[in-house]
Each structure stands twice: as C-alpha cells, then as structure tokens.
C-alpha cells in the first residue's frame, strides 16, 4: 500500500513538472500569444491544484507547517485586512507563492526515505535529461522565428527566457557533476561533452545572466580542495572559449535598440530627471521608445520609498498578494491601477516581495532562504558544497534580477536542484558498506 501511495504521488509530481515546463511552448504554437491562451491558463491552474494536493498529502514537518501558516496569516492580513480586498483576490494572488511554499514539503517527502529517494531520483535523472534535450529544438525554432528575446523561452514558452537559461545551467551542472572523475577531468569532460553542448540554447536569447552562470558553472564544477587551482588551469581555456562564443551570439543577435536599456542617455533623461514626478518619467519612456518601456530593475528600488511615502501605513505589510494577479475574470487591484507602469515589466524578487508583503514579507523570505541550507533531509544530509554555492549564487542574483520565484516552473527547477545538492551522509554510506 505504501508503495502505491508513493507511486501515485510521484506520478502526480512529474505530471505537474511537465505541465509547468512544457505547455508554454505548445500554447505559443497554437495561439501565438501564450500568456493569454486557454491552454496556458488551464495548465497553470492544474499545476497549482497538483501542488496543493501533494502538499496536503506530504506536509508533516512542524517547520514546514509553521512556514506555510505564517505566510497565510501575513498574506491574509495584508491583502484582506490592510488593503480591503476580497477572499477570492487573496487566494488568487497567493497562487504566486504556491511553488516556493509547497514544493519544499513535497520534495522532502521523497527524500526522507532511502527507498523512496532512490526510486524518485532514478526517474528524475532520466526526465531531467529529456528536459535538457528538448530545449535544443524548442529554442532553435523560437530563435529562427522570433529572433533573440523574451520569446525564446524553450519549452516554457514566451516570456520565460530567463527561467529557461537558469534551468538549463542548473540541470546540466547536476547531471555533469555526477559523472565527473576528478582524477581524469579532461577525459570526463570529453566523455560527457553532451552536457556542455546542451548549454548552447542559452546563447540564443538575450539573457545577460547566462554569462555569469556560465562562469560560475565551470568554477564550481571542480571540488574545492588543494588541487583546485591545478584542475582549473585545464578549464580556463574552455571557459574563455565558451564566454567568447556566447558574447559573439549575443552581440550578433540582440539589436542595438534592445541593448539601449542601460544607456547613458536613459539614465540622464530618466533616472536623473525629476523622480518625484514618477508618471512623468514614464511619459518620457513612452515618447522615446517604440514599445512600453521596462523600467530598469535598480530604478524600481529607487522608487520604493516614494511609493510608501505616498501610501503611509503600508511599509510593514505591503499592498497585498493580488497586486500582480488580474486578468479576464479577476479585476486589477486599486494599487495596480495606480502603479501599473511600475509593476509591469521585469521586477526583481526583492522589489516584488516588498511591494506585496512589505518588510514582514522580506523577513519571512529571509527565514525561508536560510532554511534551505540548514534543514537537512534524513540520511541524505551531507551537503554538496559546490552545488549549494551555485544555488546560493542564483538565489542572490534573483533578489535583484527577476521575480522568477513567483513561477511554478522556476520553483520546480531550483528546488529540485536544492534537494539534489544533499548527498548520502558518510556515516550512512559506511554502515551500508560494512553490511555488505
């Protein structure tokens, strides 16, 4: 009976994984505008329902319950009490956090039992490899049809170029690091060249973060020991070559107008203009650019104090989880209607969380991220230092890069990687070997 329950839950987990990571591409092919398609909407609802169901079935640890309960209390107080929104708006807006809330207890369930873990990881490795391979034809198709840009999101579809690039690096790093013989580095890389080749799709969209992740990827591929410097001497030429190739593709595929986002002209006319007149700044952007301008990430941080000054009493708990959640059947919040020009476009996660849940939301997030590195799964409780350093780098970058934590596909990829960064303890391994 226990096996059957594990089997059902594992199947549901992978159904959610593929719905989250692949229906975007199919949706874009059929409807051309994936974000508003019926398939994408149904898929997102299905993923949320799967995550909620699996979390109900697997959440048993006290800390997980406290983490979820504290979020429920904070988000309800912010959305419904402080900002006077309805229950439905609160629930709909809270879906933004389902991935990061529920995947932790779900994955913990698969890692807390050795047999369950081995069966799960065996299947997971195969499916991660398939996922990685699928990105090559998907990205190539999108690149030739649309050119480099947000539409090159691989199987995740339009708007997920950043998520797919990060996912590719995390997945390739995990699969390759399992196969590296640290005594025969070059031979290992030669035998497993496919995992390095599968990084190629990240060069075909305009995600600048790929250059950082490429360097971090190779720096952390080798164990951090006395021989590290010697090993790295063999990899430096490869890193230089790949960075050069990536730079060539970026410069040749991203037009000058798209690279204008951080130009001197923009900072002089926009950032150094009268920031007290926020909407006036947006008028400048609209008049000088052909499309709705995406406010630079760090400019949004500069605007935060002004927003809270204009709305006293919101700094501690923000403006509610529903400020990003609206559509054909859900009305936009009053805050969104006033600040749509600020909320649209790319928002760093730190900006997003403080706008929704204020200072208390930031503190909740700090506890969440710290817990990732100190709550060890039983048996598999020895940290892979290199993998966790990679994870740490991505988490820090995301605070200032984008609100990817609000997407289930990103949460699937990064939290799977997080749990895979825990290895079987030396004690458990020695006991197992002595039994043999």
Image (cartoon, grey):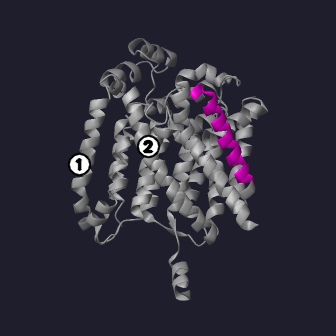
> How far from the left and from the top, in percent, is residue 46?
68, 40
305 above or below 131? above
Look at 70% across and 52% down and name the residue there. 54
Q: Does the magenta portion include 37?
A: yes
Answer few, some or many: residues within 10 Å of disc 1's Cα (few below 14, many 20 plus, some between 14 and 19): few
Q: Nearer the viewer, residue 143 or 341?
A: 143
Q: Nearer the viewer, mark 2 or mark 1?
A: 2
Q: Nearer the viewer, residue 196 or 236?
A: 196
Above or below 115: residue 261:
above
Q: Which residue is mark 1?
A: 241
- Could you say whether the residue bearing mark 2 is in a helix, strand or loop? helix
Q: Name which quarter of the figure residue 143 lies in.
A: top left
Residue at the location (41% across, 33% down)? 141
Q: Main secondary structure of the magenta part?
A: helix
What segment carries the magenta color?
35-56
Residue 364 numbered tag? none
Distance from Cα at disc 2 to Cα at disc 1: 22 Å
* x, y percent for residue 52: 71, 47
Residue that label 2 marks: 135
**Rendering coords of residue 323 (x, y %):** 64, 29
Query: Which image quarter holds the N terminus?
Result: bottom right
């Amino acid at each position: 009976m226990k096996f059957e329950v594990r089997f059902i839950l594992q199947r549901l987990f992978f159904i959610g994984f593929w719905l989250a990571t692949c229906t975007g591409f199919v949706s874009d092919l059929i409807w051309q505008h994936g974000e508003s398609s019926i398939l994408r909407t149904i898929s997102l609802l299905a993923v949320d329902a799967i995550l909620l169901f699996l979390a109900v079935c697997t959440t048993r640890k006290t800390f997980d319950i406290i983490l979820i309960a504290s979020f429920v209390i904070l988000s309800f107080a912010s959305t419904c009490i402080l900002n006077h929104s309805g229950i439905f708006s609160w629930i709909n807006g809270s879906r933004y956090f389902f991935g990061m809330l529920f995947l932790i207890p779900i994955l913990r369930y698969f890692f807390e039992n050795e047999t369950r873990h081995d069966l799960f990881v065996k299947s997971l490795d195969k499916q991660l490899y398939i996922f990685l391979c699928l990105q090559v034809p998907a990205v190539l198709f999108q690149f030739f049809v649309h050119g480099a840009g947000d539409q090159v999101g691989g199987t995740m579809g339009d708007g997920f170029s950043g998520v797919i690039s990060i996912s590719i690096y995390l997945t390739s790093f995990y699969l390759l690091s399992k196969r590296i013989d640290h005594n025969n580095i070059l031979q290992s890389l030669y035998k497993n060249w496919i995992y390095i080749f599968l990084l190629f799709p990240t060069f075909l969209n305009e995600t600048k973060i790929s250059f950082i992740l490429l360097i971090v990827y190779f720096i952390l591929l080798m164990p951090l020991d006395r021989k590290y410097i010697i090993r790295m001497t063999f990899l430096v030429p490869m890193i230089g070559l790949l960075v050069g190739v990536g730079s060539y593709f970026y410069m040749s595929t991203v037009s000058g107008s798209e690279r204008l986002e951080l130009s001197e002209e923009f900072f002089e006319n926009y950032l150094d203009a009268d920031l007290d007149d926020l909407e006036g700044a947006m008028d400048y952007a609209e008049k000088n650019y052909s499309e709705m301008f995406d406010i630079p990430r760090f400019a949004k941080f500069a605007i935060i104090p002004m927003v809270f000054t204009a709305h006293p009493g919101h700094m501690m708990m923000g403006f509610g989880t529903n400020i990003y959640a609206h559509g054909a059947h859900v009305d936009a919040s009053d805050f969104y209607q006033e600040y749509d020009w600020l909320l649209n476009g790319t928002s760093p996660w730190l900006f997003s969380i403080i706008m929704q849940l204020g200072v208390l939301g930031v503190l909740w997030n700090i506890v969440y991220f710290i817990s990732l590195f100190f709550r060890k799964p039983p048996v598999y409780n020895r940290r892979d230092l290199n993998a966790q350093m990679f994870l740490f780098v991505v988490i820090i970058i995301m605070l200032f890069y984008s609100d990817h934590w609000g997407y289930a596909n990103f949460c699937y990829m990064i939290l799977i990687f997080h749990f895979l960064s825990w290895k079987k303890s030396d004690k458990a391994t020695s006991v197992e070997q002595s039994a043999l």
